[in-house]
Image (cartoon, rainbow, N blue to C red):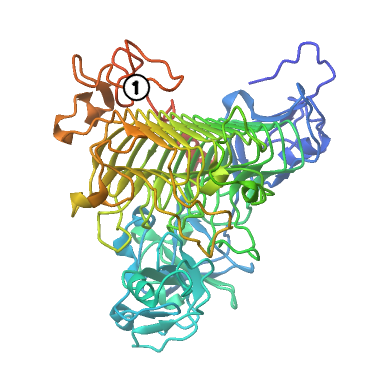
Amino acid sequence: MSYCFCCQTFANEYFVSKTGNDNNAGTKEQPFATIQKAASVMKAGDVCNVRQGIYHESVVVPNPGQKGLPIRFQAYQQENVVLDGTKTIVTEWKPYKNGIYKTHVDIGKIEQLFANTAMMTEARWPNCSLDHIFERSKWAGVDKGSEHGKIISDSIAKTGIDWTGAMAYLNVAHQWWTWNRPITKHTKGSKELFYDANLVGLCGYTAEFRDKKWLDEKWGDDNFYLFGKLEALDVPTEWFFDEKTHELYFFPPDNKKPKDMTISYKTDNYGFYANEKQYIEIEGINFFATTFLLEKCNYCKVTNCNLKYPTYSRTITEYDAERKESVITKITGDHNTVDKISLAYANNMGLMVMGNDNKVNNSIIHDVNWSGTLIYPALQLSGSPYLGVNWFNTIQYPPTPVTIENNEVTSYGNIASNNSLFNCGNALLVYQAANSIIEYNHVYDGGKAAKDVSLIYGCWPFSRGSEVRYNWVHGCVTDDWFGVKGNGGMGIRADDQSRNNIFHHNVIWDIGGEGIVAKGEFNLIYNNTLFDIKGKTNPNKSIAIVLEQNPEPVKIWAAQWPQLQKQNQWSKVFNNLGKTISTSGNIKDTIQDIVPNIFNNYRKEEQTLPLVDKYHFDFRPKEGCDLIDKGKSITKDKFIGNAPDIGAYEFGGEKWAAGAKWEENNDWLKLLLPALKKN
């Protein structure tokens, strides 16, 4: 829609159109041809109206806006505008063999290939199409005797391929991280593959942390797959690019010929980029195979945008000081807003916001992190990248509570609200900034390619003072720590040495391991509803709420801070509806309100829970049930009646819902189809 600036008559309104020319004046009648041309002349208060069409650009914003005078890029009157980060292959395709075609592409490398608007799969073993990216059966398993640096697999011997020089995806050892390593040695027909034994951040690799028996056990249930060999190209939708000869090989789907399709490859990482700018706004612009990056930017907004295949990393970024960061959708800085965007099919991270007082609201993010590594959540809220551990070195024992009202350090205060996050290889929402608010999010179906996973994950003491409230969290059934299928997975966790995390009024169900896990000190867990917290093979392995009290071991891969001698001595658990509560994470140590700080929790068989309709999102207490007015009032939260009800909902109160308030629509992709391109 067109902007009106009342008294701001000095602001300019520019237009961009596929029929324009950059030598034009940039008016509606004489529009520019590129968004970049408009960006180059825009000053504070100016608006760029982009007319319908496909734009192959990497727009760099050179000038900042000002308070009340943002620089704004918008789709004109909600027309369909797409920033397309791909380039179409126009060279001739020739038959190669067995339904495979090849062509010469004069480029150094290709990492992502598309046929029309569908992503094709780089040739790999075992085979896997995009429709099955989270299925563990599409990875190969290891055999007994595998260890750090060596894979033993009878199945690899049967391929008849020499895999030396191929690249491996390795979901190994503890399996909450995944790595890439080239295969350094393999012989055709052998079941042994070797790679450099230098996996960064490998937990338990040194004897100081775990003994050899633990190491041996952890290599027995590993998973991997291989890519980077032409010999792996054997099924439709697969492709391979030879970087030495610049030959691209492609096996088209559905018996089609490449000439009857639009075949393109990713070229542009960022459709919009700004560095150290303020008050930049992007609205209504769609991104295909490209994304946005706003670095060290403040008071910026991205709203009403759709992103499909926004980022792709052929290999994985690691927790390593020497690493080169992957291309991800990211905003760093303060007071930025992301509102009502959809983001889908990024093989690495979904969205990261880093800094102070940033907001991600009413957005849909799904089908991300295909490798299962923890460093790629669907949504990550991070504090300042310069936050160190010096603050933790000042902590005395017993520790002093850190509250939002009385905080000794800078509050980062990021907010994630009313988002729908689903289908992810590991954690869906990670918060590692102080005083974050995580509320009204629908978070489900994560941990699909890993184990020891929590859907909402508070990362170490960096998450201090954060509040996780009014969320629906479900669908995390993984292998457990020891590889037993169906007995692992967590709903919400405040991990190692966390401080002052507050979890309240969340509904958590269909979890294989634990519903809520809190470590550290001064945590509050109250008025949550938990059910179907049970392992698929052994329900006795699962616990609704775990309040860890044992000391956390020193971990060699993590930043170090003073270790608590005992955890959660001052934490409180009350007014929760959850059958099993433990102070150690062991079902044998289940307690029945014998610890002073654990009280007023409702523990009965789940089949008899007095909820209106728990399997159709109505978690309110039934009229007259024994949840009503049975809670303790020790917080400032409002309630109805003489006392709070037990659980996440008040009888007679609001029937609140979690998740985005709109439904994703991919009609905008039709603009990219060949038939429409010809028009």
**Image: 251 above or below 465:** below
Describe residue 90's horizontal placement relative to residue 171 as left or right.
Answer: right
| Residue visible at 18% across and 29% down in the picture | 609
**Image: 670 above or below 560:** above
Count of numbered circles in the view: 1
Residue 201: give x, y in percent of width and height. 52, 66
Image quadrant containing the C terminus: top right
- Foreground of the two, 657 or 285: 657
Image quadrant containing the N terminus: top right
Residue 110: give x, y in percent of width and height. 57, 64
Using the rendered view, name the quadrant where residue 570 is placed: top left
Describe residue 341's horizontal placement relative to residue 253 as left or right.
Answer: right
| Residue visible at 19% across and 18% down in the picture | 625
Residue 589: give x, y in percent of width and height. 26, 49
**Image: 32 above or below 350:** above
- Foreground of the two, 258 or 299: 299
- Foreground of the two, 177 or 273: 177
| Residue visible at 48% across and 68% down in the picture | 202
Residue 114: give x, y in percent of width and height. 49, 55
Using the rendered view, name the quadrant where residue 445 is placed: top left
Describe residue 436's horizontal placement relative to residue 504 as left or right.
Answer: right
- Foreground of the two, 191 or 284: 191
Residue that numbered label 1 is attached to? 632
- Tell me if mark 1 has few (under 14), some (14-19) or many (20+) residues whose alpha carbon lies within 10 angstroms of its own: some
Task: Look at label 1 and name its amino acid.
Answer: Lys
Using the rendered image of the protein, determine whether residue 110 is visible from the camera's viewpoint: yes
| Residue lying at the far right of the rendered structure | 10
| Residue visible at 63% across and 32% down in the picture | 357
